[in-house]
Image: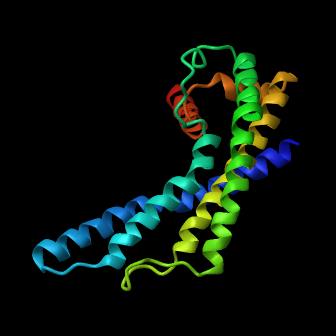
Amino acid sequence: MKALADQIDRINKTIGRFVMWFALLIVLIQFTIVLMRYVFGVGSIFMQESIVYLHGFLFMLAAAYTLSRDDHVRVDIFYRDAAPRKKAVVNLIGAVLLLLPVCIVLLWTSLPYVMASWATSEGSPETSGIQLRYLQKTAIPVFAVMMGLQGVAMIIRSLQALGGDEAELKNLQVESIPEQNDAKQASVGENKA
């Protein structure tokens, strides 16, 4: 089961790290649009719509990666100071009762919407816009699947932590990002040497 959770994390990490570059593209395209409009007096609906597409893909496809890194916004003010086992219980309950049902409902309700868009090859209402609106809408069920899979990984890791897996308990104990912790621990080890 741990191998499945690790594989889900790897997939979401790969996709998340790819789409994070969309943020840079958005900035560059927006800069180009402003330059074209206010310096040269030229507009581009295609470029303006590309920002909407990239923004949507960025947030929809990077959400599962953010969840895997525990960088999402938490409303629970008690979670931060809780013991690792309590954190595992919160994660387990949250994934089973909230995350997975919402992902299932989102997938169930979005599929007809997205399939209708694909059936008509829906595009922009503007003739010079991006004629791939069906691809943009496809991000909705992809988001639901990726988040659902990450929920499964959370459930597996929570059950392992509750079963006494020391590595999973340690991951829940650490408050900051695991990749940063590895770098901090390496630098501390170098400073002691």
Pick the front one: 160 or 130: 130
Query: Quadrant of residue 42 in the image?
Result: bottom left
Please provide percent x and percent y for residue 89: 75, 21
Pick the front one: 10 or 74: 74
Taking the spot 75% from the left edge, 31% from the top edge, the residue there is 97
Taking the spot 69% from the left edge, 29% from the top edge, the residue there is 171
Please provide percent x and percent y for residue 61: 58, 57
Question: The C terminus appears in which quarter of the rendering?
Answer: top right
Query: Quadrant of residue 136 in the image?
Result: bottom right
Question: The N terminus appears in which quarter of the rendering?
Answer: top right
Looking at the image, residue 111 lies above or below residue 65 = below
Pick the front one: 87 or 109: 109
Describe the colour scheme in one phrase. Answer: rainbow
Please provide percent x and percent y for residue 91: 71, 28
Looking at the image, residue 21 lies above or below residue 10 = below
Taking the spot 62% from the left edge, 25% from the top edge, the residue there is 174
Residue most extreme to the bottom: 127
Pick the front one: 108 or 149: 108
Looking at the image, residue 123 lies above or below residue 97 = below
Taking the spot 83% from the left edge, 27% from the top edge, the residue there is 165
Taking 50 as reference, is 160 left or right? right
Please provide percent x and percent y for residue 13: 63, 53
